Image: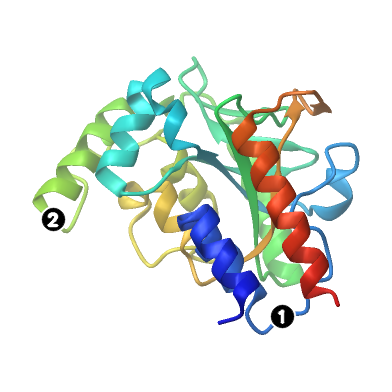
Amino acid sequence: MSQERKIVNILLGELGRLIQKHLEGHRLESRIFLDPQKFREHLQDFDIIINYKFPRFLRRSPFSRLIVTETHSYATHTGVYYQGKIVNSRMTKNALVREPISDRKDGILLFLRPKLTIKQKKQLHTLIAQTLHQKGIKFDFSGIIGFFIYEMLRLKHNPLNARNRYFCSEATAALYYPVCRLVSKDPATVSPKDILESKRLRFIGVLDGVRDGRPNHKTHDDLRYMQRQLLMIQHRLKR
């Protein structure tokens, strides 16, 4: 392993391993950090979006802290990039929504891409469009409790799975399930970590500093340091 890849691995831990996996055997053709002004140029419909939180900010979100504790991963939320926005499950009246892309003050967004045929893309477009217009879809609170029970007791299925109810990673996996399985598991047992580690997805880049689809000036010492280090690594790899 080269010194640069060791730096990535040590610097970012779980995220570093993902980027390292992307770099191994691949020529680095694009920036690891996507430009907030032009990030849509690097994305395609049906890319996967993962919210990745930093440990020091978990105390602000007990729910995210619980996800991290049970899954041993800082990946806490997922969605699908579709027509310039993110399709994901929220705690709203109609749970499945399409909304502007925003990172959070306590983390960044990771983009990953499945390998899809033209036929599969057409199928996904139809499925997502139909699902967004479907009424009665609710957030799966009981399914989340069932997921934690599934994890703790190592069950084969989510014991509290409910029809037409989805938590975030369940919704992402379920949208793909009829076309191509992102993970070889029932959608009701899929966590953000499962999607992050899927061998069927290719790493595209990291996005930091976007609010409601537009660039903002959100920065933290963690992010500035990480970005400087990664840009230095990219420069060395391109030599």
Disc 2 residue crowd, few under 14, some 14–19, many 20+, Cα 10 Å = few
Tag 1: residue type? His
Dot in front, 2 or 1: 1
What residue sits right under mark 2 in the picture?
154
Residue 145 horizontal/vertical position (percent) = 22, 32
Splitting the image into 4 quarters, where does residue 87 fall? Answer: top right
Question: Of helix, strand and loop, which one carries label 1?
Answer: loop
Does residue 3 appear left or right of residue 170 in this picture? Answer: right
Res. 26 mark:
1
Callout 2: SS: loop
The circle drawn on residue 180 is: none
> The C terminus lies in which quarter of the figure?
bottom right
> Is 34 situated above or below 89?
below
Residue 235, image x, y percentages? 82, 66
* Crowd class of label 1 (few under 14; some 14 to 19; many from 20; radius 10 Å): few
Counting from the top left corner in percent of width and height, residue 171 is at: 47, 42
Q: Nearer the viewer, residue 221 or 63?
A: 221
Residue 115 appearing in the image: yes
Above or below, 227 against 93 in this view is below
Q: Nearer the viewer, residue 134 or 203?
A: 203
Total numbered labels: 2
Residue 177 visible in the displayed image: no
| Residue at 40%, 28% in the rendered image | 58
Label 2 vs label 1: CA separation?
A: 36 Å
N-terminal of the two: label 2 or label 1?
1
**Tag 2: amino acid:** Arg
Q: Residue furthest left?
A: 153
In the picture as drawn, the residue positioned furthest to the front comes out as 3
Check the image and report above or below for 92 versus 184: above
Residue at 72% x, 69% y: name it. Answer: 119
Q: Look at 84% across and 70% down and name the residue there.
A: 29
Whole-percent x, y for residue 79 in the image: 58, 42
